[in-house]
Amino acid sequence: MSMAGKSEPIIEVEGLMTAFGDHVIHENLDLTVNRGEVIGIVGGSGTGKSVLLRTILGLKQPDAGRIRVFGIDLAELPEEERRLHERRWGVLFQDGALFSALTVAENIQVPYREHLHLSPELMDELAAIKIAMVGLRPTAGALYPSELSGGMRKRAGLARALALDPEILFLDEPTAGLDPIGAAAFDDLINELKEALGLTVFLVTHDLDTLHATCDRIAVLAEKHVILVGTIDDMLRSDHPWIHEYFHGPRARAALAGK
Amino acid sequence: MLRVEALGDWRIAALSAVDGELRALAGRKIEAERAVIDFSGITRFDTSSAAVLDRTARLLEEKGLRVEFEGASDAQRRLLDKVDACDTPDRPKSPPVPFYIEIVDRIGATMRDMGEEARGMLGFVGAVVSAIGRTVANPRRFRFVPFVHHMEKSGFDALPLVCLLTFLIGAVVAQQGAVQLRQFGAEVFTVNLIAIIFLREVGLLLTAIIVAGRSGSAFTAEIGSMKMREEIDAMRALGLDPMDMLVIPRVMALTVTLPLLTFIADLMGLLGGGVVVFFMLDMSPGVYLTRVQEAVDFWTVAVGLIKAPFMAAVIALVGCRAGLSVTGSAESVGAMTTRSVVRSIFLVIILDALFAMFFTAVGI
């Protein structure tokens, strides 16, 4: 875990450029995430927050620039070795992306079955613990994704992301579509897991409450690159028009007052 | 005193090796009052190993031992606490059902499903008929563009496949028929064989089966994925009737195109037969056509074509209904598509048998 002044970078993005055809999403984007911190990525719709996340995960090829995770440029590794490192992160996609043909418990066990040799009892036991850890009822394990509410799907997706005790947790809009109580509970959950598991969390969000409640640092995406990285106080002091609007708008004041 | 020393890398990948031993340990008879689990040798630790050690400690405590964690770091203690709080009591598992009960149970469930399915299908047919009635009463409800679109997709686009297959089957039937009939010196009747068999039965059956596989499955998959992505609900919420938008155009399009396809299939079958007859029996095309005309009367052709719209309706109805019965998962789209094809081919053949009985009874 990171101490003040002694921070070890876990994700390093340098000079990233991504584009869909002629449409350039990122240009000259630099970002460093340190081990043990929760970093929030904010930006207007269409500024490429999710694309950045997908590019770091290797789901989209960058057109230029370097991305190093765990100090390694994963794109240069052979397939086999990359797989080994990919097990060291967990991802929660926007709507959970659970496998619809499997129950929640089976979804959580997918990485166990694929990557490890564990006895069925141990897998059941571990799945039950992950289910409890993300705040689902024990009965949820036997349900199929189509039988879950949106909030439960996100929690189940989080349980699957945590299955292998990842070092980095990527969350794509984890609180979008949740009611305020559910969203607040999710924020607490992220803090709690970060404390207990020493996670690094890469959080893409629009939710100002989540930013206040969980993030150590915030990176603002605009004009195709990261225009500012800093704490919430840095954001409040910035006079960049978009950042000012975002962190001083009516919703931001409400979130701030709620603190 | 019982002492458990944990050493080295205790992450999940290494757990299967120690899990069995720890379970065995907790299951043994132990003559001690105190157990110590020593954490100081652990280099790497995670939730899963915390879960296993926590469970071991709990099992030992149930045997009346006092369990202490020695040398655990703050982070390790936090994990242990977290896991301990998450531990859920094992629910008693229901005893396994004996296989003979399970077989009976499955047969019963299948029968019940079939009964429900039959009722559902009947209801669906009723709903479609009443929707067609509404459309007739108010023709402006009819969606002309999707109707034409589906005629093109399930009719026109199927032409190459239908033509090729019926041409080949026609040729094969003629060749086999000629070989057998030659034994009686009756090879000229090969023409009657091809003409009757194709115009009455095979042309239609082949076409219907091809269309069931091509278009019935497409209907199910299209409507099914729309259902899965809540597009059907969106239509209802916008005040649009999925019956009008999706089902009626497909049913009508197939009902119109299958007889047309069948007619072309008949011609191609006769052509395939004619080519074989030309080469095997040296019968000129002119003679072939005259003999076909002699062998066939109006009702031979009519019997084949009358059946076509009914089979088309069955294929389209089964396909659309299967699509609308899709539930949330991607797997269910696949299952429903399979079911729709199997069921429509099955019903097409049953229907053909019923028509055969009917036509025999009325003497055609």
Image: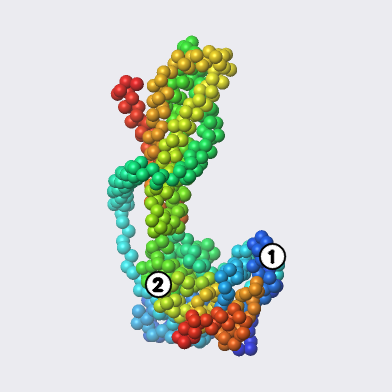
At horizontal 53% and vertical 31% (from top left) the residue drawn is B163
The amino acid sitting under disc 1 is: Asp
The location of residue A232, given as percent across then percent down, is 56, 85
Q: Which residue is mark 2?
A: A136
Q: Are marks 1 and 2 on the same chain?
A: yes
Image quadrant where one finds the C terminus of chain B: top left
Number of numbered discs present? Answer: 2
The location of residue A75, given as percent across then percent down, is 67, 66
The location of residue B152, given as percent across then percent down, is 51, 40
Asked if residue B29 can be seen in this view, the reply is yes
At horizontal 32% and vertical 68% (from top left) the residue drawn is B92
Examine the image and state in which quarter residue A258 appears: bottom left
Examine the image and state in which quarter residue A248 appears: bottom right
Instruction: Give the answer, above or below, for where B272 lies relative to A114.
Output: above
Could you say whether the residue bearing mark 1 is in a helix, strand or loop? loop
Give the distance between the C-alpha atoms of the residues marked 1 and 2, in whole angstroms.
41 Å
Which residue occupies the foreground of this view, B127 or B68?
B127
At horizontal 44% and vertical 35% (from top left) the residue drawn is B256
The residue sitting at the bottom extreme is A4
Q: Which residue is mark 1?
A: A63
Instruction: Give the answer, above or below, for where B281 lies relative to B145.
Output: above
Please give left or right for residue A10 compared with residue B222 in the image: right
Instruction: Give the answer, above or below, for where B110 lies relative to A18.
Output: above
Q: Chain of mark 2?
A: A
Asked if residue B172 can be seen in this view, the reply is no
Q: Chain of mark 1?
A: A
Which is more foreground, mark 1 or mark 2?
1
